[in-house]
Image (tube, rainbow, N blue to C red):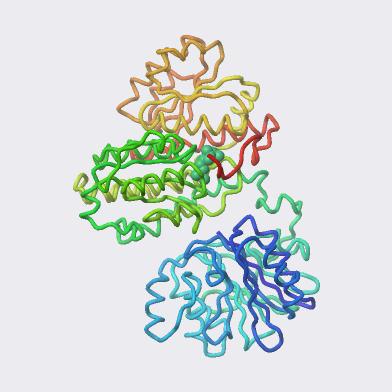
């Protein structure tokens, strides 16, 4: 996720671009850049780091005179944060500049073709192909050129473009990435999100997929993919400027929960090609995958919980032994590692001190290492032998939701891939798994639509003192995450327990009315968990069950039931966690807690 802006009007563009970008920093903040037409040329200035570095470099825009320009705040996807990879990107003759939010999925193919036509690339980004492609098709008419590239580029994009030949105009186009146009009194603007323009105007056009906008000082024209002019209605924004940064959501956590369908899609789609799983970044031959003797998954917190789920899947599906360790324990137990072991380090931030230390320990002992990381160019991403990125975008809320979901999906893909290469599943089974995986985003969306029912239920537990989460197998892993979500943002004491283990001590804590959330998604374990539910209820527990659609049996045992749609037994975590995230969120809101910044916690734990 990145943020783009653009301006043309009566005022100096650079300060307005920088101000707009400051409202979009939540979308990315590893580097930033602006391009301004200075009356003769398009000048570009970029800086690595937060936006304030660029602001200082340009004296708040004063060193970049001109009344039209575009800007970008980056969250690296293709290529680490660096000056070369920061946007805007030029064509070779520096007569076109482009900023981009999204992912060009066929950029490698396009890059190869352009290189054959003598185009030279200065960055590792997918965006630079757009600048050269525009150059290649440009015959003097920008709209015609943009429509041509729209037919050739696959993936998602919101683009801001300026052409030296058309100095009085800013161009924009989108597909599957957000883009709005603001109609101001002394100029017009483009942006990835409304907050970037609210200081200048409240009259906004929401650009739809495959629509092009052409901005001049006074006017805005809209075109379709065939270059035909279209009419659009503007909307008057009446939100509060602070709320707008969260896209109208009350908290970043809520916004990020609602981003999960996109996150899952973005992590899956680029790795499924012609009904096959292609994880190019894995860089392992089939022989190397077959030679793996054991997998170690090492992580902290929620990332560790996804690892616990992955253990069940790798072992069940690919029949590879898996050990899962908390990173803070791993290095101190002197793990037995060698070159036939694969150590997978999972981390959203890529900077968690214990996970990084575990990675170094694994490398020192000669194991192969793979990072599953969200932040491109982070320490774990740089130091692991290979890295598989989760495309969740920046996660602002301390409590992880969308990065967690993206990690799960990355692990599913790896497990299916390994199972297939090791001959443990048939092609037909792979097809079935892929079908189920591709349904997940829609199913998550459906579950998120059920928030009112969960909010209502959560309101009853605002005063709870203890809550238990129980399950068996993968359901136990889901319970661990459900429990962590609740305790970290609502400060209610909560524990996750393997359902069968309760009677070995913990059941003595159950009192009249104690809430127990039972996760029951593994069909072969239904009966066993239902017996545990019965034991709990007979000691006074109030049991909320989260189970698969169709498991009506459970209604006789539990007090309250939430259903998730049918999916493969290995992927239920991605669905069952949604109501549990919503439950924690609404309990926290009901208690008046600081949802996005819970006490005593930091987003990235960089000390051991
Ligand atoms: O950045 P990482 O994924 O390495 O962080 C690991 C944990 O600190 C993190 O998952 C933490 O448990 C979350 N706040 C939970 O919501």
Q: Determine whether, in the image, residue 36 is placed left or right of residue 390.
A: right
Q: Determine whether, in the image, residue 597 is placed left or right of residue 290.
A: right
Q: Where in the figure is residue 244, as x and y percent of width and height?
A: 70, 53
Which of the 4 image quarters holds residue 270?
A: bottom left
Q: How many labels does the image show?
A: 0
Seen from the viewer's position, the closer of residues 138 and 235 is 138
Q: Looking at the image, is 85 positioned above or below residue 137?
A: above
Which of the 4 image quarters holds residue 32?
A: bottom right
Seen from the viewer's position, the closer of residues 162 and 428 is 162
Q: Where in the figure is residue 23, as x and y percent of width and height?
A: 70, 59
Q: Where in the figure is residue 425, as x and y percent of width and height?
A: 22, 45
Q: Determine whether, in the image, residue 412 is placed left or right of residue 137.
A: left
Which of the 4 image quarters holds residue 202?
A: bottom right
Q: Looking at the image, is 101 positioned above or below residue 213?
A: above
Q: Where in the figure is residue 237, as x and y percent of width and height?
A: 74, 57
Residue pictured at 65% horizontal, 76% vertical: 35
Q: Determine whether, in the image, residue 485 is placed left or right of residue 249.
A: left
> Which quadrant holds the N terminus?
bottom right
């Amino acid at each position: 996720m990145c943020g783009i802006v653009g301006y043309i009007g009566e005022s100096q563009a650079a300060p307005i671009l920088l101000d707009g970008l400051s409202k979009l920093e939540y979308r990315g903040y590893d580097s930033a850049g602006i391009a301004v037409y200075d009356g003769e040329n398009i000048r570009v200035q970029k800086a690595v780091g937060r936006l304030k570095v660029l602001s200082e470099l340009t004296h708040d825009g004063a060193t970049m005179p001109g009344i039209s320009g575009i800007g970008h705040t980056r969250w690296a996807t293709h290529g680490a944060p660096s000056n070369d990879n920061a946007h805007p990107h030029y064509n070779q003759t520096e007569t076109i500049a482009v900023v981009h939010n999204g992912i060009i999925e066929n950029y490698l193919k396009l890059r190869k073709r352009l290189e054959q036509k003598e185009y030279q690339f200065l960055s590792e980004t997918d965006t630079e192909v757009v600048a050269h492609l525009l150059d290649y098709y440009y015959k003097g008419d920008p709209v015609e050129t943009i429509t041509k590239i729209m037919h050739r580029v696959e993936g998602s994009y919101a683009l801001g473009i300026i052409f030296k030949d058309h100095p009085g105009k800013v161009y924009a186009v989108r597909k599957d990435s957000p883009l709005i146009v603001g109609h101001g009194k002394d100029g017009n603007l483009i942006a990835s999100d409304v907050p970037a323009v609210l200081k200048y105007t409240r009259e906004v056009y929401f650009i739809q997929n495959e629509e092009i906008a052409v901005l001049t000082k006074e006017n805005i024209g809209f075109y379709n993919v065939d270059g035909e002019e279209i009419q659009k209605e503007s909307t008057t924004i009446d939100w509060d400027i602070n709320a707008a940064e969260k896209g109208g959501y009350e908290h970043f956590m809520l916004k990020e929960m609602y981003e999960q369908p996109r996150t899952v899609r973005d992590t899956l789609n680029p790795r499924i090609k012609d009904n096959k799983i292609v994880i190019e970044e894995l860089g392992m031959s089939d022989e190397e995958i077959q030679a793996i003797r054991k997998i170690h998954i090492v992580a902290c917190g929620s990332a560790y919980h996804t690892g616990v789920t992955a253990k069940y899947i790798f072992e069940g599906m690919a029949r590879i032994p898996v050990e899962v360790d908390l990173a803070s324990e791993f290095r101190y137990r002197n793990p037995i590692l060698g070159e036939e072991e694969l150590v997978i380090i999972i981390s959203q931030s890529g900077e968690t001190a214990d996970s990084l230390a575990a990675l170094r320990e694994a490398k020192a002992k000669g194991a192969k290492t793979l990072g599953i990381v969200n932040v491109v160019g982070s320490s774990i991403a740089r130091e692991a032998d290979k890295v598989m990125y989760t495309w969740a975008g920046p996660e602002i809320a301390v409590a992880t939701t969308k990065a967690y979901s993206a990690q799960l999906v990355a692990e599913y893909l790896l497990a299916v891939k390994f199972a297939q290469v090791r001959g443990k599943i048939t092609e037909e089974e792979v097809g079935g798994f892929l079908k189920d995986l591709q349904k997940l985003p829609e199913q998550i969306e459906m579950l998120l639509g059920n928030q009112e029912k969960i909010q209502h239920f959560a309101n009853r537990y605002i005063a709870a003192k203890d809550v238990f989460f129980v399950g068996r197998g993968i359901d136990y892993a889901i319970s661990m995450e459900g429990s962590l979500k609740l305790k970290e943002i609502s400060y209610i004491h909560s524990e996750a327990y393997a359902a069968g283990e309760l009677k070995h001590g913990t059941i003595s804590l159950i009192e009249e009315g104690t809430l127990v959330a039972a996760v029951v998604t593994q069909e072969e374990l239904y009966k066993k968990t239902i017996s545990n539910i019965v034991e709990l209820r007979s000691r006074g527990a109030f049991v909320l069950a989260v189970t698969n659609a169709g498991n009506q049996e459970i209604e006789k045992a539990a007090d309250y039931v939430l259903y998730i749609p049918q999916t493969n037994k290995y992927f239920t975590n991605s669905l069952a966690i949604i109501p549990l995230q919503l439950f924690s969120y609404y309990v926290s809101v009901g208690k008046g807690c600081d949802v996005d910044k819970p006490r005593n916690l930091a987003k990235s734990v960089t000390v051991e």
